[in-house]
Amino acid sequence: MSSVLDDNNWPLEADFSDNMIKVNPVIRPMTKDERNRARVKEAANNLKPCISCGNPARDVWCHFCMGEE
């Protein structure tokens, strides 16, 4: 076995066979009921926009921006 990796020579960890778990690549759009529930949940969380990046946050700063400061 040569040390060069090409299309016919892969290590055992790189198993690209058809036996792998199939994942549905299609993400369906939200239904009207799901969208309404998401809006109600977001409103109930009382999230305010982060003053640095504008993402929803519980405090003045979001977790990411607080870690960067």
Image (cartoon, rainbow, N blue to C red):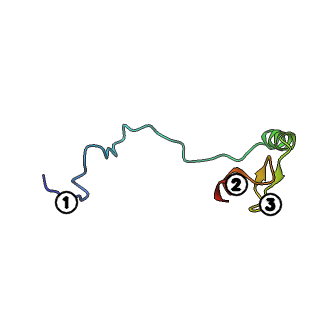
| Count of numbered circles on the image | 3
How far apart are labels 3 and 1 at the CA level?
51 Å
**Residue bearing the label numbered 2:** 66
Question: Circle 2 — which element?
Answer: helix
Tell me the residue at 83%/41% (across/down): 45
Of callouts 2 and 3, the N-terminal one: 3
Q: Please indicate whether residue 23 sits to the left or right of residue 52 in the image.
A: left
Q: Residue at x 78, y 52 (%)?
A: 56
Calculate the distance from the C-alpha at mark 2 to the C-alpha at mark 1: 46 Å
- Residue at the outermost left position: 1
Per the image, the residue denoted by label 1 is: 4
| Gap between marks 2 and 3 measured at Cα | 11 Å
Seen at 82% across and 43% down, the residue is 42
From this view, report whether residue 44 is shown above or below residue 54: above
Q: Residue at x 22, y 54 (%)?
A: 8
Residue 66 x, y percent position in the rendering: 70, 54
Residue lying furthest front: 69
User: Mark 3: few, some, or many residues within 10 Å (few <14, many ≥20)?
Assistant: some
Quadrant into which the C terminus falls: bottom right
